[in-house]
Amino acid sequence: MREKRRVPYKVYLSEKELPTSWYNIQADLPTPLKPALNPVTKKPVTPDDLSPIFPKDLIFQEVSTERFIEIPEKVQELYKSFRPSPLYRAYRLEQELDTPARIYYKYEGVTPSGSHKLNTAIPQVYYNKIAGIKRLSTETGAGQWGSALSIAAAMFGLECTVYMVKVSYRQKPYRKMLMETYGATVIPSPSEHTEAGRRILAKNPDSLGSLGIAISEAVEDAATHDDTNYALGSVLNHVVLHQTIIGQEAKIQMEKIDEYPDIVIGCCGGGSNFAGISFPFLMDKIRNGAKVRAIAVEPAACPTLTKGVFAYDYGDTARMAPIVPMYTLGHGFVPPGIHAGGLRYHGDSALVSQLYHDGLIEARAVYQKAVFESAVKFARTEGILPAPESAHAIKTAIDEAIKCRESGEAKTILFCLSGHGHFDLAAYESYFSDHLEDVEYTDEMLKEGLSCLPKIE
Ligand SMILES: Cc1ncc(COP(=O)(O)O)c(C=O)c1O
């Protein structure tokens, strides 16, 4: 017998209950991060190395080991216009699966940009604004990050240039139009605007681009213009830090209904929404021995954690970004043009990588057809159309709920629904017309990808 409804469909928080600081897991890491290295000298990166492209506050957050970092008042104010995001109980999905598991999801699609990315776009633009910066350059894969930065830049009156991975630029014309509506300039990457882009196009004029290439272009743009800084939508420690607003809110919301998750799940591209939802719970695991499991879900076509190696690698294709210890498939790897554009990244956040290496989190790789099957099941039961990226988390939540049905265990599952899929209908159409392919990641790909790892003494 399924239990009767005892908690509301949706748990909100009042403005007064909103967290006022971000949680920094660097304070609690069992193994501290190894330093990031300068891509040219291969010596540990110094604040001076980063200051041509980042403001000092973000450089400070990148290396801070303070456990809680206060959210500036201006940022808290702007957060209040769309936060807290709701925590939903997936009653109808549970019923469809006939599972004793209790499934909860934190829905980040309610932000104006449609995903969690605005949680970091706002503080990043804020810190750049107070540092006197006039323009930001960035990359975008699926278009979610570019949209978020465009909105935040408009809020603070900064210009914004977005290098959008070419395959997404073609698949998602409406994302481009959205960014332009907010005043951003959108350039398909690889482009002729930068040395990095021109080099790629000379080798392969038909290149579909990748996040690694777009990052190189955006970094080069920032490094060669005094009034311009660079902003990254994932991977870096300060981005991960800002996203912990998700898990901190979820914790308070769950407390309100007397719940605590057995399993926390997030899709994993660079790792920021996964980190955002899971790190505040991992704090309990590391500090107080909480039994919570955290699962990062990635595409089988770009299986960074599950098939990559833990090594020092460049964050971008043109080797301009710092060399960071992370799980990687090799910075030269260009993942196939799967429909979860935001998960097509060769590497992963250093923090997520270190935690995975230390056995504190788990990882899964899933195929895109099964991901879309889960997305459609979710849309038809819960009513929300998920972003293809977020649907990776749904697939794994469903798998875990089915395991509960088989074992009879009533586990509490929490996942991050990182964004909506309103701009991803072409991907859904491909799924319905049977044009989606499950791309296999081969040992040869790995061998080739790893052949270009930097040699570090
Ligand atoms: C909706 C959505 N979810 C997840 C991701 C993956 O990024 P991350 O792993 O940093 O959360 C993206 C990236 O573009 C995205 O748009």
Image (cartoon, helix red, strand yellow):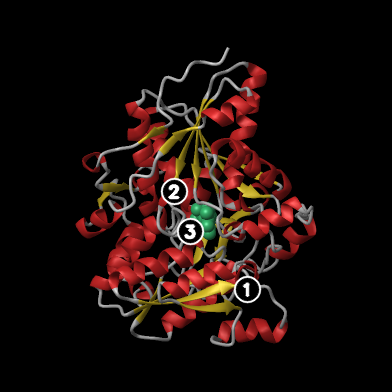
Reply above or below: 249 against 336.
above
CA separation, marks 1 and 3?
A: 21 Å
Reply above or below: 31 against 437.
above
Disc 3 marks which amino acid? Answer: Val
Q: Of label 1 and label 3, which has the lower sequence position?
A: 1
Using the image, tell me which numbered label, if any, was put on residue 108. 2
Mark 2 C-beta to ligand 1 under 8 Å: yes
Reply above or below: 210 against 377.
below
Percent across and percent down for residue 89 are 47, 31
Residue placed most toward the observer, 400 or 50? 400
Q: Residue 157 is drawn in which quadrant?
A: bottom left
Q: In the image, which is nearer the foreground, mark 3 or mark 2? A: 2
Disc 2 marks which amino acid? Answer: Glu
Asked if the residue under mark 3 is in contact with the one under mark 1, i.e. CB atoms within 8 Å, the reply is: no
CA separation, marks 3 and 2?
A: 18 Å
Asked if the residue under mark 2 is in contact with the one under mark 3, i.e. CB atoms within 8 Å, the reply is: no
Label 1: which residue? 166
Percent across and percent down for residue 413 are 51, 30
Q: Is residue 256 left or right of residue 444?
A: left
Q: Is residue 314 left or right of residue 255?
A: right
Mark 3 C-beta to ligand 1 under 8 Å: yes
Q: Of label 3 and label 2, which has the lower sequence position?
A: 2
Q: Residues within 10 Å of mark 3 (few under 14, many from 20)?
A: many
Callout 1: helix, strand or loop?
Answer: helix
Label 3: which residue? 235
Q: Is residue 238 visible?
A: no
Q: Residue at x 37, y 55 (%)?
A: 119
CA separation, marks 2 and 1?
A: 26 Å
Disc 1 marks which amino acid? Answer: Lys
